Image (spheres, rainbow, N blue to C red):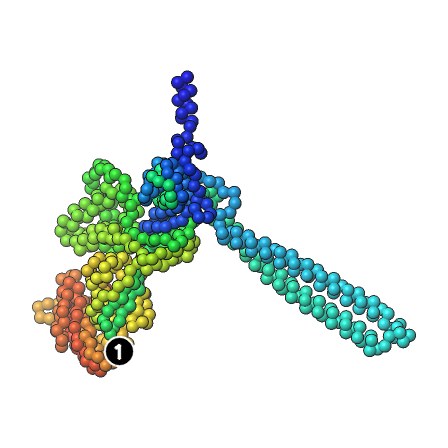
Amino acid sequence: MLIAVLLSSLLVAPAWLQAEGPVEHSSGAGADASRITDVVVFPNHAEVTREIVVDAVAGENRVLFSPLVPGLGPQSLRASVPTGGRVTGTELRTVHLTSSLSEEIAQRDAEIRALEDELASNTQALARRGEEAALYKSIKERFLGDASRELAEGAVSVDAWKDVLGFVRDGLSETDEASTEVKLRMRGLDELLTTRRAERSDLAGRQPKQMKEVAVAFIAERAGPMSVQIHYIVDAVIWQPSYDVHLDRASREVGIVGYGQISQWTGEAWTDVRLTLAMSRPDAELSLPALTPMVASLDAAEMQQLAKDVTFLSRSARGQAREWSEQRFGRRQDRETFRRNLEQLARNSQQALAKLGLSRELIEDALDALVDRFAGVRYAVEGRETIPYGTSSHKVVTFQASVPAELKFVATPALGDTVMLLGEVLNTTGYPVLDGPVSLFVDGSYVGISAVQGAAQNERMVFGFGPDDALVVQRRLLSRETKGPEAFRMSQVISYHYEITVENFDDLPVEVEVGDQIPVSTTDDIQITFLGSTIQPGIETKTGVLRWPIQVAAGQRLTLEYAFSVECPVEKEVHWK
């Protein structure tokens, strides 16, 4: 008896799921239809908030959200009643579709039926034209057969005979033209019908065979309208930042417009929603970290791989480093172990690092790339947005701001005769700027596409706005002289003498930073000596880079010269690499 009671109690559904008791509310079409109100888009998924407003009764209520996308998983589902009640349970169910949920499919079905009806009507019209043509042909054959006899007997005049022939000829010509017109129209209808059927088939192939529905049970403190919400995670979503940067040279201000490029294939349209774009990845930080054994190793192959990883990270953009890190490290401890190895590596001597093709600078750059400074960034998009699902990308504005710019002209005559305009700004927009592509404009005119590296608040950013047509720079070799061998040394000295000219065709004076370089040596057999310049440059000894800040008046042509020498073994040809 006790076993029977226990079994019967196990077979009875919880009270909030039983048909009797709670008042049922539906999310079907009409005033009670649920709608998406808020979406938070992460780099590869989104959190969706869907709401239904019901006329609740005091006490137990139950509302059904349906249909919902099939990718909705039970792990991410939660329900809430913002005010005046509490949730007592949720149930996620699978619903197998018996009819189309897609408005696009229904529209294609209507278009296909209309095209089939029009084709049928044109087929009938073509048949009638065929009957008319057959009638005219029968009249013509009969008349031609009797014409000679009736003309001989005087039963018909020549004029009447011509009238009948003209009537038959005009009738056949009219039916031929009409038939041709109908056939052309039918051909177009048939092609359009084939296209619509293919579109319908493609849409049907992409439509899921099943959907989800969620039942939410809640208790209302009092009767009246009440908002019930469900929150869930959907995949097949991506967003990426991009920017428009406008330089106003007169005011020396840079206007920055940030965008979020969103694509989503979730199966549900986000219509008139509050939108937030976030860079965090909460799914990767929810699991409890577990410490596992960290094994000491002397494997040379592992050290070589570590060196390759350092080289890649030190040269990669932050977005690339983040993607690499996500794929490379399955656990947080793997990432921490990698970081510890880099810290140990950085304590080695420069000579030891050079054997691995590394330096302390490269290791520091790699360590910096591992730190995602913008993981907590969130942009709350102003107003409301509508983002359909499909293959198209939707662009929303994340922020707009203007900041003062320090304009700078930079020339590298060894690499070209143009002078580039740079704008240096501090990020005082009030928003972090993420890595992304940039469309550049100068005084309202589009100049090209570039990229920006991420910048936090009050961090420096530099934008290149392309060449300035009013400035021209040129570099030429004035002389190359060889002397030697020198006394007591079997060496020769090769001297190079260069000239650089900068011309300003504008009506305003400018300062141009001219950059060039002398070679550097990594061997004792070659000695490089800077011999001087008509204008003293700044010299970076490690790289051989020379920089001259030059004031060029309006309409002025300014010239500078510099020279350097290369001492090397006699009868050896020096080349650059």
Q: Is residue 524 above or below residue 98?
A: below
Q: Is residue 399 visible?
A: yes
Q: Quadrant of the C terminus?
A: bottom left
Residue at figure coordinates x 39%, y 31% from the top left: 14
Residue 216 left/right relative to 403: right
Rendered location of residue 526, percent (x, y): 15, 65
Look at label 1 and name its amino acid: Ala
Q: Is residue 92 visible?
A: no
Is 416 placed left or right of 89 in the picture? left
- Lateral position of residue 250 relative to residue 116, left or right: left
Return the residue found at the far bottom. Answer: 555
Rendering coords of residue 336 (x, y %) = 21, 44
The front one of 109 and 88 is 88
The local secondary structure at tag 1 comes to: strand
Name the spot of residue 379 as percent of width and height, x first: 29, 55
Q: Is residue 260 left or right of residue 515?
A: right
Front one among 414 and 291:
291
Q: Is residue 391 above or below residue 214?
A: below
Out of 280 and 33, give the one closest to the viewer: 33
Q: Quadrant of residue 179?
A: bottom right
Q: Quadrant of the N terminus?
A: top left
Q: Position of residue 48 (x, y in %)?
A: 36, 47
Residue at (25, 66) in percent of width and height: 402
Residue positioned most to the top: 1
Indicate whether 441 appears above or below 64: below
Residue to which mark 1 is pinned: 470
Other-residue count near label 1 (Cα within 10 Å), few / some / many at <14 / 14–19 / ≥20: some
Q: Residue at x 40, y 19 (%)?
A: 3
Name above or below for residue 457 compared with residue 229: below
Residue sticking out furthest to the left: 488
